[in-house]
Image: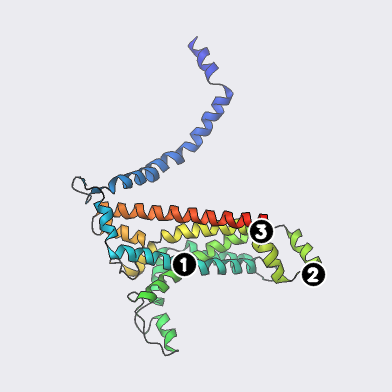
Amino acid sequence: METSKKAKWLTEKRRTALSAYLFISPFFILFAIFGLFPMIFSFYLSFFRWDGLNPMTFNGFKNFEFIFNDPVFYSSIKNTFIIGIMGTLPQIIIAILIAFALNSTLIRFRNTFRTMIFLPYITSIVAVAIIFGVVFNNQPFGFANYILSFFDVGPIRWDAEYWPVKIAIATMVFWRWVGYNTIIFLAGMQSIPKELYEAAKMDGATLSQQIRLITLPMLKPITMFVVFTATIGSFQLFTEPLIFLGRNLREEGITMVAYLWRDAFVYNSFGTASAAAIVLFLIIITLTAINLWITNRIGRSKKIS
């Protein structure tokens, strides 16, 4: 009797649904353990004082008061914005130009160049640190200082001066991510129907008109995706300033993620680090919402016109 009831409950539709849930469950279980729980715990921890060893002590909003009265915290926000703009804006423009060149039939060995442009993305960050440590060495024999000496510019302390630190870190970000974005733009260009270009050529459209009137409008979803990921990535900038400046993370180049990492793992102040993480989370959510609103407004105005 019970066997017949089980057989009736476990229908073919439910068996299929159960199999689907079992297949997708590993992702959600791992996300709950390594993603959701740390986020909730950070919210909880931001209201406590905790050094990682002794019991936690509730101190209300004092962690937020501390970071909002810390000048280094504001410097980290400012640095994150400046380095983000310097590193991502030129990166997107250059990535579109390189992708257009790699999509052209005039270039030979395109597959070789496509592989080479992607190499910086898969290069070890340690190797990147060694290369850029030589390029932006403070000594006169450093590569950047050596090049500048031809223009009668004296040696620059790349890891200690206000703008040189930002230029060096932005250059590392640019070098590491331009190939990744190039491949994304290239995939988007290859999805554009060739008939559009052939029709434009028959109508006498020039190359610049084809780019302006066909390529760029058709790449709009890809561009939006790249801008979103680049914006979020620039606010999560951590590895480059850490390997370039070391654990001390001077104020001239510290970013928001580096600031909260230093609070947590150098000063053992997990409460203020969690408070900084929440502020960073709110900034990213706000800017993402503004970005979406602007994008929707632009698309709507074009449809109306």
Residue pointed to by mark 3: 218
Hey, what amino acid is under mark 3? Met
How many residues crowd mark 1 within 10 Å: few (<14), some (14–19), many (20+)? some
Residue pointed to by mark 2: 204
Query: Residue 59 appears at what percent x and percent y?
Result: 22, 48
Hey, what amino acid is under mark 2? Gly
For residue 116, say whether it is visible.
no
**How far separated are the C-alphas under marks 3 and 2?**
20 Å
Q: Tell me whether circle 3 and circle 1 mark residues in contact (CB < 8 Å).
A: no
In the displayed structure, does residue 208 sit left or right of residue 158?
right
Residue 224 quadrant: bottom right
Hey, what amino acid is under mark 1? Ile
Does 284 appear above or below 87?
Answer: above
Residue 134 quadrant: bottom left
Q: Tell me whether circle 2 and circle 1 mark residues in contact (CB < 8 Å).
A: no
Disc 3 secondary structure class: helix
How many residues crowd mark 2 within 10 Å: few (<14), some (14–19), many (20+)? few
Disc 2 secondary structure class: loop
Foreground residue among 56 and 14: 56
Residue pointed to by mark 1: 85
Foreground residue among 291 and 117: 291
Query: Residue 75 appears at what percent x and percent y?
Result: 33, 66
Query: Residue 51 appears at what percent x and percent y?
Result: 21, 51
Does 68 appear above or below 7?
Answer: below
How many residues crowd mark 3 within 10 Å: few (<14), some (14–19), many (20+)? some
For residue 168, say whether it is visible.
yes
**How far separated are the C-alphas under marks 2 and 1?**
38 Å
